[in-house]
Amino acid sequence: MTVRQTSSKGQFQPALAQRVVALTVTLLALSLAGCATTTSPDRMSTGSIPTLTKPVDQMSPGEVATATDSMGRAYAKTPQNPQIGIAYANLLQASGRAPQALAVMQQVAIANPTNRQVLGAYGKAQAAAGQLEQALVTLTRAQTPDRPDWRLYSAQGAVFDQLGRAQDARTSYQQALQIQPNEPSVLSNMGMSYVLSGDLKTAETYLRTAAQQPTADSRVRQNLALVVGLQGRFDEADKIARQELSPQQAEANVAYLRTMLSQQNAWKQLAAKDGGKA
């Protein structure tokens, strides 16, 4: 499940807050790219651009490892290629190697200083590596007033949320939604922003709207399951979680949520702030 921290009033404990933000950034708001093609990642002939058979977030750990090795060899041959560099950094990020992903994107950005896609991916890599202020600068550079990119606004919003600037974050999400109405990933980020401030009812409203969109993916629905669970409706959360996960995965998610809230005493704090009863 993807979660975020709450604000200073009625907040999660610090250790939980750090875990929450890290998971959100990695899984939804700041993914570097989603490559979906039909070419085998093993096509490494000179002059060709290797591609991926499916989006990185849909790969198994074994598939990520294989694709990372293949894309790494392609990157070694042509480190200035923006398409290869972004794909390689995305795979490294999925492998938990954020510092290396950042180093790759730094080199690609040096070689392609005016490429918007590269600058956007570089800013997201900076944020994933914890360089939040630098990420905002890079993402702002990538944005252009005449052709604004909703993905960059959404990424900026996620960074603002991590910096505790909730109003700036929600303004960025609204800017993204003006360009891409009802985009489920942005609605989900908006919902999780309200989780940060402890407003679970508003968060659930945004997440339910996000989950109802035809293009909503599993991560959006898992966020909804999380927020429902945070309000103590574990049976409903479990039902939502089981719609797309295996029984073992769903059970693990709900068990983790119960344990997390119990250990951190977070449920009582959230319930008190949200007007509910534990």
Image (cartoon, rainbow, N blue to C red):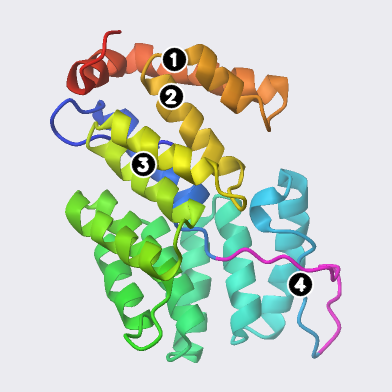
Q: Is residue 162 left or right of residue 85?
A: left
Earlier residue among tags 4 and 3? 4
- Relative to 23, is 98 above or below? below
Residue that carries the numbered disc 1 in the rendered image? 233
Find the residue positioned furthest to the left. 9
Q: Secondary structure at mark 2?
A: helix
Neighbor class of circle 2 (other Cα within 10 Å; few <14, some 14-19, many 20+) is many
Q: Are marks 2 and 3 in contact (CB under 8 Å)?
A: no
Earlier residue among tags 3 and 1? 3
* Label drawn at residue 51: 4
Q: Tell me where residue 255 appears, x and y as whole percent.
A: 53, 15
Residue that carries the numbered disc 3 in the rendered image? 192
Q: Quadrant of residue 262?
A: top left
Disc 3 residue type (three-letter): Met
Q: Secondary structure at mark 4?
A: loop
Earlier residue among tags 2 and 4? 4
Label 2 vs label 4, nearer the camera? 2
Disc 4 residue type (three-letter): Thr
Q: Are marks 2 and 1 in contact (CB under 8 Å)?
A: yes
Q: Are marks 1 and 4 in contact (CB under 8 Å)?
A: no
Q: Secondary structure at mark 1?
A: loop
Find the magenta span and give its range.
33-46
Q: Is residue 35 magenta?
A: yes
Earlier residue among tags 1 and 4? 4
